[in-house]
Image (cartoon, rainbow, N blue to C red):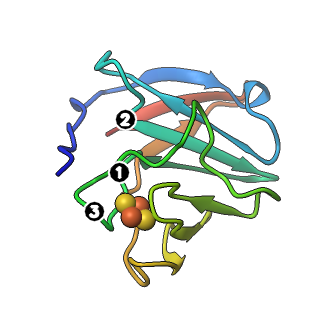
Amino acid sequence: MHRTVMPKRFTSMRLANVADLPDPGARGFDPCEEGRDTLFVVRRGEVLRAYRDACPHFGGTPMAWRKDAYLNGDGTRIVCHAHGAQFDIASGECLLGPCLGQRLTPVEIEVTSGGEIVLISA
Ligand code: FES
């Protein structure tokens, strides 16, 4: 059983600039310095979303098989590499796999006019 460590709440914290993320692509972050990424930001065109790095299938299992590997091969879906669940990037809904219909937990972010991605709450 994996334990999901809930990050502290932030009033705001800069994570990265949009230009730092590949398109399509994703990047994990460890805002509470827990020694592993606890959330990730996905970029696909104009869509930018952030979710906890915790699969709903099995006790909040971390999802990437290596650093920042949160997407499928063509960058169209988020993938949990533990058992292959696939999630819609925009909604976080599981579209294929053992947690069909469940959702990733969203993380609130804002993007400034300068492209800075700011964590609002986690
Ligand atoms: S833990 Fe993610 S698909 Fe099973």
Whether pointer 2 and pointer 1 mark residues with C-beta atoms closer than 8 Å, the reply is: yes
> In the rendering, which numbered label is found on residue 30?
none
Residue pointed to by mark 2: 38
Q: Nearer the viewer, residue 9 or 81?
A: 81
Q: Quadrant of the C terminus?
A: top left
Between 33 and 114, the one nearer to me in the picture: 33
Q: Position of residue 16 (x, y in %)?
A: 61, 22
Mark 1: few, some, or many residues within 10 Å (few <14, many ≥20)? many
Q: Earlier in the sequence, mark 2 or mark 3?
A: 2
Q: Nearer the viewer, mark 1 or mark 3?
A: 3
Question: Where residue 44 sits in the image (x, y, percent)?
Answer: 76, 53
The residue closer to the viewer here, 64 or 21, is 64
Image-based side of 107 in relation to 110, left or right: left
Is the CB of mark 3 within 8 Å of ligand 1? yes
Marks 2/3: CA–CA distance: 15 Å
Decide: is 39 above or below 61. above
Relative to 116, residue 74 above or below = below
Q: Position of residue 81 (x, y in %)?
A: 52, 54
Which residue is labeled 1 in the image? 54
Q: Quadrant of ligand 1?
A: bottom left
The CA span between labels 2 and 1 is 7 Å
Give the labeled residue for mark 3.
58
Tags 2 and 3 in contact by the CB under 8 Å rule? no
The one of 7 and 110 positioned closer to us in this rendering: 7
The kind of residue tagged 3 is Phe
Choose top left, top right, bottom left or bottom right for residue 25: top right
